[in-house]
Image: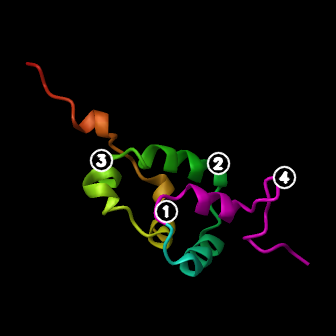
């Protein structure tokens, strides 16, 4: 019997999906997110690292986080592979 893609644990009892869900800033439509996670099976360390950067990105912080994608959308789009412009990079002024 093989383990479900949602059941891989980190040794502390949390599944990789639960770790993703806890870290994601917009927790909407969990069932869709679980299905997307099972389909994509992304590497959790890469996902958490990407989230750490993306939650500080201009697109995710503007207008109170209004433009943060739903978790299933982010997973289906393989958002952990996106290049990100950080807020500090985009807000710097050219002094020339």
Disc sitting over residue 58 in the figure? 3
Residue beneath disc 4: 11
- Secondary structure at badge 1 equals loop
Number of numbered discs overlaid on the protein picture: 4
- Membership of 21 in magenta stretch: yes
Q: In which quarter of the image is the C terminus?
A: top left
In primary-sequence order, the first of circles 1 and 4 is 4
Looking at the rendered image, the disc whose residue lies closer to the viewer, 4 or 2, is 4
Disc sitting over residue 78 in the figure? 1
- Compared to 70, does 84 lie above or below? above
- Compared to 58, does 37 lie above or below? below
Q: In this view, does 45 lie to the left or right of 50?
A: right
Which residue is drawn at the image coordinates 32% and 42% (left, top)? 85
Q: Distance between the residues labelled 3 and 1?
A: 19 Å
Q: In this view, does 18 lie to the left or right of 90?
A: right
Which residue is drawn at the image coordinates 43% and 49% (left, top)? 55
- Secondary structure at badge 2 equals helix
Q: How far apart are marks 2 and 1 (CA)?
A: 14 Å
Looking at the rendered image, the disc whose residue lies closer to the viewer, 1 or 4, is 4
Q: Quadrant of the N terminus?
A: bottom right
Q: Distance between the residues labelled 2 and 3?
A: 23 Å
Quarter residue 40 falls in? bottom right
Q: Where is residue 8 in the image (x, y as percent from the top left)?
A: 79, 63
In primary-sequence order, the first of circles 2 and 1 is 2
- Secondary structure at badge 4 equals loop
Q: Where is residue 21 in the image (x, y as percent from the top left)?
A: 59, 63
Q: Position of residue 65 (x, y in %)?
A: 34, 58
Q: Distance between the residues labelled 4 and 2?
A: 14 Å
Q: Identify the magenta region.
A: 1-26
């Amino acid at each position: 019997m093989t383990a479900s893609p949602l059941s891989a644990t980190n040794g502390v009892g949390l599944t990789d999906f639960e770790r993703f869900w806890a870290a994601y800033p917009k927790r909407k439509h969990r069932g869709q997110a679980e299905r997307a996670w099972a389909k994509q099976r992304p590497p959790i360390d890469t996902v958490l690292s990407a989230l750490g950067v993306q939650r500080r990105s201009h697109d995710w912080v503007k207008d109170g986080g209004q433009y943060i994608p739903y978790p299933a959308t982010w997973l289906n789009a393989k958002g952990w592979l996106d290049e990100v412009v950080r807020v500090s990079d985009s807000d710097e002024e050219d002094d020339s």
